[in-house]
Amino acid sequence: MLVELKRAVRYRAWVSGHPAFLLSQSFDHERNVRRGLTDEDHLRAAAQWLAAAQDSQSDGGVAGRYQLGRGWTSSYPETTGYIVPTFLALSRALPQASFRQRAERAVQFLLSVQLPEGGFPGLEIADNRVTPSVFNTAQILHGLTAWHRETGDEEVRIAAERAVQWLLGLQDPDGAFRRYAYEDRVSTYSAYLACRLAEWGDYAADRGALAAASRHLDWTLAHGRPNDWIALAGFDEEQHQADEAFTHTIAYTLAGILTTAETLGRSDGITAVAAAAERLARRLELSRFLPGLVGGDWRGRSRYACLTGNCQMALIWFRLHGISHNMRLVNAALKAIDLVKLAQPMRNPNPGLFGGIPGSDPVHGSYIEGAVPNWAAKYFIDALLEKQRVLAELQIETARPAAAGNPRGPILPGSASVPTRRLNTVMLTTVRSQKVPQMLSAWRERDIGNLTVVVEHPAAEPAAARLRRRLRNEGLSWIAARLNAAKDSAADAAAQDIQSVHLPTYCRSHGIAVLETGPLDSADAVAQIKALDPDLGIHAGAGLLRRPLIDAFRLGVLNAHMGLLPAYRGMNVAEWAALEGAPVGCTVHLIDTGIDTGAILAVWEVDIAGCGSVAALRDAVDRAQLALLGDTVGSIVSGRMPEPLAPAGVPGPQYFQMHRDLVALLEARLLGARTPHLEGEGDRERPRILAG
């Protein structure tokens, strides 16, 4: 409580708009989603904040930040420089809002602060007017390049060339920039400096600038590690020593390498960025959050997000998609933007807060603590505009045709053996899953052995923690939702009974043995399952299984997967395959400790020509996987264990939950591609598990 009180005083909780903003840090985090705000709403709000940041100054520059502790700061030449292209982009997206004039005012400010030697000052203008900075000068060069491209302004061309010559004179023989760098320390995020030289060199046919960018790219890539981390990407010496970096400077590094590599046609740079960007995309997907501070092992080292880094990484993921048509990276980009939208104040009377993007989420995180920086709004706007462009392209793009259907089958087992006894089969599920009734209904005519259903009761979240989580995410809206649900409970009772049965009761009523356990990864649960003398396991809605439990089954644990392995691992893979124009189907495999990497026993390619919706697609694949799993179980129980199929290639990437914007895109494609489907037409015979 004392910490919160001190923070409230430091953040001036009595100033207009501050109380509501500070409350939002720990209460009702999902309010923007619940209000149904659109991307355009968020874009206009961020643009309004950026305009307010410029209007807070009398010199035409853009205020560096709005600090909760003291309000608007002074104009920041560096970020004003790279806000110029954003103003120009806004002038096209919001043509009535005078953003082109704002860009011109920003350029005039920049010209007024250029130093005699050609460089531009570091820090905000109130803190420094005389000492140049190589990194800041390069970002201003980016703005001058954009303005000259737009207008052909001769004064701007001369200023840009002076800046370039000053930068070239400071590059060391090894390609690095050390002099006039932040704290006079070398960092690989200066790749975002060199890429501005590459941009100018390409635009102005300046061979010296292109050569300098190439030397710096060599120097940066030399700091790459086998795990795809690029050393010295941190902001300062402390982060270098700790081998960590903000996502902001990681993104600077990756964007710089990527821009230079694309400009120079360097595949080595593109490959390095793609590998590192995949690491961060996986971190976001696994955590549903992108930590603001990341270590050299790619693990998060903070509980706050660096919102600028989210936006910058979204831009990088979009760009890589443009190179390799990688929809998984589009998925990550969309989710990263959503996390920023959650933190944007959209109902606040203070122009320093409304529409701005905090440095950290929560705002007391270590990145630009207690402030709303202008560059966060700049990159957020850039990311929203790029999202709009990418989705528009995807909407008019037809799905790539699927490869010719070659289901691997019929699938022949190994030598048959006469069972000495009926096998003990065990279904592994959780108390919340409805997989067991679904499977047993589909297999009612099959012999699946001596069945026991193991029902896991996961450890319950403590009530206090659950209340804190709901208040932080949903505010008080969940209470209203529960009250409304209670009013409708009588009308919905029948539907609820149909959709959700009490699993232990269901099993006992059907004469099926039940074992109820705690978490399946506990030693006690494993011991109880071993006591059943299990032969064959069937994954029926349980979570990830660990080695001690897998090893308890003599023949292993089967899983039905809604995708064709090994290419499509993870979640929503039927949808992902359809979206990417690949064959859609299902697989039965043995579970190991990886994600869908165990030995493949059977596959079935599903014809989705008649599926006019995502729901129909999922239903078709779900019916197929139930039938294929039933065939496999029946074969094993009868003494015919299938031989694993020869791998068709290395395991594909892991897919994660598909973003709703991509689901909507797939929905539209399926609806548009639906053709009349005659009875029996396209119903490809599924591979069977045959007797040897």
Image: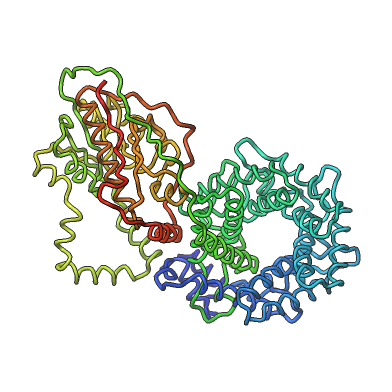
Question: Front-most of 423 and 63?
Answer: 423
Q: Indicate the quadrant containing the C terminus: top left, top right, bottom left or bottom right.
A: top left
Q: Quadrant of the N terminus?
A: bottom left
Answer yes or no: is residue 255 visible. yes
Q: In this view, does 103 lie to the left or right of 464?
A: right
**Residue 364 visible in the shown view:** no
**Picture colour scheme:** rainbow
Closest to the observer: 623 or 303? 623
Placement of 672 over or under 300, stated as above or below: below
Give the residue drawn at x 24%, y 23%: 691
x and y percent of residue 171 in the render?
Answer: 85, 50
Residue at the right extreme, as displayed: 116
Q: Where is residue 388 in the image (x, y as percent from the top left)?
A: 55, 65
Observer-nearest residue: 260 or 340?
260
What residue is shown at x 22% (from left), y 33% (from top)? 426
Q: In which quarter of the image is residue 472?
A: bottom left
Question: In the image, is 593 to the left or to the right of 262?
Answer: left
Q: Position of residue 133 (x, y in %)?
A: 80, 60
Taking the image as shown, residue 424 lies to the left or right of residue 398, namely left
* Position of residue 46 measured from the top left corner of the image (x, y, whole percent): 58, 73
Give residue 454's quadrant in the image: top left
Q: Could you tell me how many numbered marks the image carries?
A: 0
